[in-house]
Image (cartoon, rainbow, N blue to C red):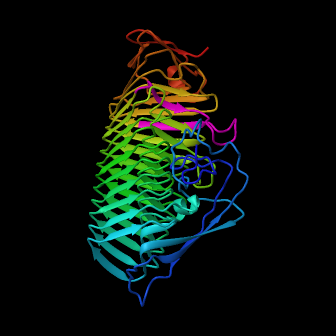
Amino acid sequence: MNDPVSTQRTRIRTGVRQAGVLLAIAISLVVAAGCSGRGVDTATAATATAATAATTSGAPANGDAPGGAPADAPGDAPGDAPGAGGGSGTTALASTATGAYSQSGGSATKTGQTYTASKADESGVLVSSGGTLTLTNATVATSGNTSSSDNSSFAGLNAGVLATGASSITMTGGTISTTGTGANGGFASGTGSSLTLKDVTITATADGGHGVMATQGGTVTVTGGSMTTSGAHGAPLATDRGGGTVTATGGTYVATGTDSPGIYSTGSITVGGAAFTEKVSENIVVEGANWATVSDTTMTSGSDKSGVMIYQSMSGDATGSEGTVTVTGGSLATTSKSAPAFYVTNATGVIGLTNGKVTEASGVLVKAAAGSWGTSGSNGGTAKLTASGDTLTGDVVADGISSVDLSLTNGSALKGAINSDKAAKSIGLTLDGTSSWTVTADSHLTTLVGAAVSGTSITNITGNGHTVTYDATASANAYLKGATYTLVGGGTLAPAS
């Protein structure tokens, strides 16, 4: 898909970046506006230097581009997904950042002010060098485009409100609106940098404009308010290179652009008590060994790719290959008839569901399969899903280089077929003593742990006349003794031939 902030690369920003490019980013922002430790409210924009080192190396060319069209993966924004980046060899990328209000160090408090920025690479509010700024009922509006999608995605160039260099900004009430390419609403970049938003309304309309982003160890905290992104590659909540942290409590989040998932994590994103609507993109995307944790939140995805995706793009923005999505309470809905609720590719996806509601119009609950990232033949997915107290419907599918392990606990129930086409590399199902499976088509398991054996019958699997096979040579199945059993409602559990 198109690069979030840059059309020169195909990624899934907040989704994916074109594979074949590994970027290692070192960022420093130095603002020249300051005086004796006091913040300066300048009439003209003060200048800060944003230096970004990027590395390029030969990752497989098929590696990052989203699967299929813009992709399988969510569309991030200019920057891929954050996470931790690596690569070798450096190419210097330098840009000039400015702010309609620029503060270097010191402490300042502002109430009811308006900050308007229209130049390229210009932020509405820019705080650096350990500065502290408190804004109340501010109006921030920017319209300038970015000169570097990487600098916008990794360092916050031309973000509406930007905290960098171990600085902190707290904004209560008010609005942030951006219309320029690459222009994120709020941004925190660098260890010790933080942005705290309380009841703020954010709109970002251009390609690569996320609601908020955190990179290089920066932290963003959101309470209440609302965010709307309408450009491509613009997730409301996102992290990018360097492992940022975003925490959101309450609020409403709407993304209408292509490749713009509600959450794009290459770091750590935690959400509670919120409402998300993604018109054509995923609910959640996690890249690399990173996390998204959602509780008591409603999410509705219109993506025709997947509702939740865990992957490794090989772009260098996120290291590792085991991503984690945890959902407690609330609901996850996927409305497209072609999209599985959960999709894992070129990675291991650890999915935890507790007392929530998952629905998908496609009838596919979990899909693990090769996509457009990684090396062909070894880029399958491994999905590990544990459900606790959940009622799930939908089939479980995988291709020949992919695996799925399902664990149903605490009264969970699954209604669907598992590996009905016998294509999977391996499929395992574990049932605790309180959980059950209702079979909707002939299914084929590698391992079946926890089948309730009563004589020659299995009492916690309803067969509906279908046949379920298992691998009699697998040690986990030794308790089944290679025998054939009848299932509730007809059908059989039998060793694979």
Q: Is residue 314 left or right of residue 265?
A: right
Measured as percent of width and height from the top left, residue 334 is found at: 40, 33
Q: Which of the image's four quarters has the C terminus?
A: top right
Which image quadrant for residue 297? top left
Measured as percent of width and height from the top left, residue 415 is found at: 39, 22
- For this rendering, which residue is in front, 9 or 344? 9
Q: Is residue 209 left or right of residue 197?
A: right
Vertical comparison of 380 with 320: above or below: above
Which image quadrant for residue 388? top left
- For this rendering, which residue is in front, 133 or 480? 133
Residue drawn 37% across and 43% down? 327
Measured as percent of width and height from the top left, residue 98 is found at: 49, 72
Q: Which of the image's four quarters has the N terminus?
A: top right
Vertical comparison of 302 with 315: above or below: above
**Residue 384 drawn in magenta:** yes
Q: Is residue 159 left or right of residue 389?
A: right
Q: Which residues are magenta?
A: 361-386
User: Would residue 232 be visible to someone looking at this image?
Assistant: yes
Which image quadrant for residue 386? top left
Residue drawn 31% across and 50% down? 272
- For this rendering, which residue is in front, 254 or 46? 46
